[in-house]
């Protein structure tokens, strides 16, 4: 697998899996490793939360993973000094504002406004109205608020497209002409992850190995999707399992968001999950192989390890042995 911009995605998958395991109360981070959490039962539990009639009944938490890829801020930039930094809607009497507190953006999804802090706190177990700063001070609560907002407001609109998820998170600040440049930047960033940068122009972009599976000479099997599915010997069996023509229409992975997410889950369950019990290093190898491992790119491997151990420390999770490949 080759995915220049998605290397940190593997780390994020591991981190969010740990957090979700904590949320559902199914694991003790001191007693179990990530391998104990990433199970079929766990995945099916996530899938089961979606509407039975939803077309995208799959592991859609990947978008939360993408939101978590590049944490630079835990509070809204210029939040305390921003106009209307209190973010208080006095008309919402169910969740009244504390005049001494501000409800500007905090956490991975930048939770904002009293009408979100209040119910999030009730659901998760912190005082959102009187101690909103908890979202910026407690990393576990911080992740929980992102997942809470995602499940309640973003996941229900995934089937309507990427634009609908932007609206669910940002609203009129960017949508409906609020900030078209930023909206376009988000779309561009989204497609950078959907289709491997430089894919069609990359050396050996066809990524064809005719040893086991045939190739369509008019198609290329370079990296596409959240996990950057690559090579005909992955596209074809993934297509057979999921229900698309991986041989003749590999571009479906970059064009159909449901298929795109399904290929990531298919690859994870078949090739990554089986080695999680061996340590973080083998998961890097399962995703990126010799491109990074066996001296291929030691700096990138070390960067992945640094990210992984940093989040493990924050969450109180034992990173386990065999961190490198």
Image: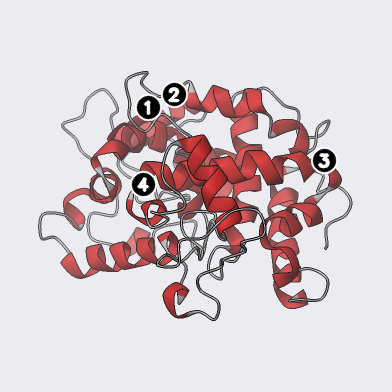
Res. 64 in view: yes
Q: How far separated are the C-alphas under marks 2 and 3? A: 36 Å
Image: 175 above or below 299: above
Circle 3: element type: helix
Quarter the N terminus occupies: bottom right
Between discs 4 and 1, the one toward the N terminus: 1
Is residue 93 left or right of 16 when viewed as pictured? left
Q: Dot 2 corresponds to which residue?
A: 122
Q: Residue at x 64, y 30 (%)?
A: 21
Q: How far separated are the C-alphas under marks 2 and 4? A: 33 Å
Between discs 2 and 3, the one toward the N terminus: 2
Between discs 3 and 1, the one toward the N terminus: 1
Outermost left residue = 177
Circle 2: element type: helix
Residue 7, image x, y percentages: 61, 64
Report if the CB atoms under discs 2 and 3 are less than 8 Å apart.
no
Mark 1 nearby-residue class (10 Å; few <14, some 14–19, many ≥20):
some
Is residue 79 left or right of 24 when viewed as pictured? left
The one nearer the camera, 2 or 51, is 2
The label shown at residue 257 is 4
């Amino acid at each position: 697998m080759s995915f220049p911009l998605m290397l940190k995605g593997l780390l994020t998958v591991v981190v969010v899996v740990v957090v979700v395991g904590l949320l559902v109360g199914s694991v003790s981070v001191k007693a179990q490793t990530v391998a104990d959490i990433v199970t079929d039962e766990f995945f099916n539990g996530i899938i089961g939360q979606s509407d039975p009639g939803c077309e995208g009944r799959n592991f859609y938490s990947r978008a939360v993973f993408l939101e978590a890829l590049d944490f630079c801020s835990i509070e809204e930039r210029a939040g305390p000094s921003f106009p209307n930094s209190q973010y208080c809607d006095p008309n919402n009497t169910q969740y009244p504002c504390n005049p001494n507190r501000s409800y500007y953006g905090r956490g991975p999804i930048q939770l904002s406004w009293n009408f979100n802090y209040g119910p999030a706190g009730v659901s998760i177990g912190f005082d959102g109205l009187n101690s909103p700063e908890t979202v910026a001070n407690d990393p576990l609560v911080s992740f929980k608020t992102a997942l809470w907002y995602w499940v309640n407001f973003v996941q229900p609109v995934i089937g309507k497209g990427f634009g609908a998820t932007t609206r669910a998170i940002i609203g009129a600040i960017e949508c409906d002409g609020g900030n078209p440049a930023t909206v376009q930047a988000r779309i561009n960033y989204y497609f950078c992850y959907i289709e491997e940068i430089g894919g069609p122009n990359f050396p050996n972009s066809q990524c064809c190995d005719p040893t086991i599976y045939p190739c369509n000479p008019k198609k290329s099997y370079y990296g596409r999707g959240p996990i950057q599915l690559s090579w005909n010997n992955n596209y074809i069996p993934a297509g057979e399992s999921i229900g698309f023509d991986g041989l003749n229409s590999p571009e479906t992975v970059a064009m159909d968001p449901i298929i795109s997410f399904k290929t990531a889950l298919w690859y994870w369950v078949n090739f990554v999950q089986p080695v999680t019990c061996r340590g973080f290093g083998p998961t890097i190898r399962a995703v990126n192989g010799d491109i990074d491992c066996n001296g291929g790119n030691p700096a990138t491997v070390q960067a992945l390890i640094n990210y992984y151990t940093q989040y493990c420390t924050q969450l109180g999770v034992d990173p386990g042995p065999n961190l490198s490949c």
